[in-house]
Amino acid sequence: MKKITKAIIPAAGLGTRMLPISHAVPKEMLPIVDLPAMYYLVKEAADSGIKDILIITNRDKDAMEDFFDLSIEYEKALAAKGKEEEIRMLREIANLANIYFLRQKETKGLGHAVGRARSFVGDEPFVVLYGDDIIFSETPVCRQLMDVYEKSGKCVVGVKAVAPEWVSRYSSLKIAPVEGSDTLFACDDMIEKPKKGEEFSNYSILGRVVLTPDVFDIIDHLAPGAGGEYQLTDAIAKKARTEGIYALDFEGERFDMGAKIGFLKANVVRGIAHPEAGEEFKAFLKAFVKTLD
Ligand code: UTP
């Protein structure tokens, strides 16, 4: 079985739920305290053993490219101020992985975005990190999924039980427990954004999947799905129905950076843990909470 060394991060969506800021800043570059969301995705992939990462972008890719690049001019200015630690930090970010960029050109859905990565992936299994799903965990979530793939050779999707009223915004999976595990399920069908009555369960795919390269043939023949977009879930559903896949209820806390509430929560959670600003922020929050009704 081939080792997984490649990841795709689709980040070319319109980000309409984060307007107006997403008109000028891709939601994947919105900060969680002092790091953009995209940093956490690249770091998670790198910490999972991924070497090559393809970020699918639209017209706003410059900020992403700059963030993961070295800037000799900037380093010179930092060196002149004796800021060696800051230089080290920026170099560490630039050296996380080999990062490539590709434009989706037309915003036709997550399935379409992933389909653009065919030549990057070649004939290897790969992981997809949805660009607006940030997950903080003990073991990187990609690694958790890759471990299941490496034992089974089957596609694996990261799932969580979501509140029943949220299932219609995500996907719904038909799953059955795998003997001997509380977190691993066999999955043989799924539906994207189910209407009332179409749900299989309240388990939804949240942000991470491991796929085998034959999925590109399925993507190439997708018909537009929910919302008129080419849905990655529809391609994975075909794999689930024909050969079965695994669903892993991963360990980790997920924040939807594509939604205002997810963005705010992520900043509070990371804010109180921040080595520089955390203590003062926590004291502020404690006092502030007392002023709320
Ligand atoms: P979403 O559906 O959450 O992103 O896609 P969106 O379309 O930007 O969301 P709205 O407009 O707020 O509803 C999940 C991930 O897939 C990427 C997005 O950037 C996001 O990271 N995506 C989505 C693409 O790369 N291309 C697409 O055509 C659609």
Image (cartoon, grey):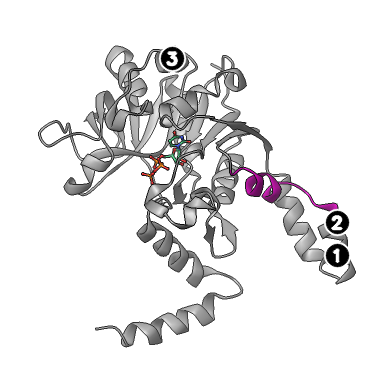
Picture layout, residue 97 above or below residue 70? above
Question: Residue 185, can we see it?
Answer: no
User: As drawn, is 66 to the left or to the right of 4?
Assistant: right
Q: Give the residue at mark 2.
A: 73
Mark 1, residue position: 77
* Residue numbers of the magenta segment: 60-72
Q: Residue at x 27, y 16 (%)?
A: 241
**132 vs 229: above or below:** below
Q: Is residue 99 magenta?
A: no
Mark 1–mark 3 distance (CA, rounded to whole Å): 48 Å
Residue 278 in view of the camera: yes
Amino acid type at image mark 3: Asp
Q: CA distance from mark 2 to mark 3?
A: 44 Å
Task: State whether residue 177 is above or below residue 259.
Answer: above
The amino acid sitting under disc 2 is Glu
Image check: 6 left or right of 90?
A: left
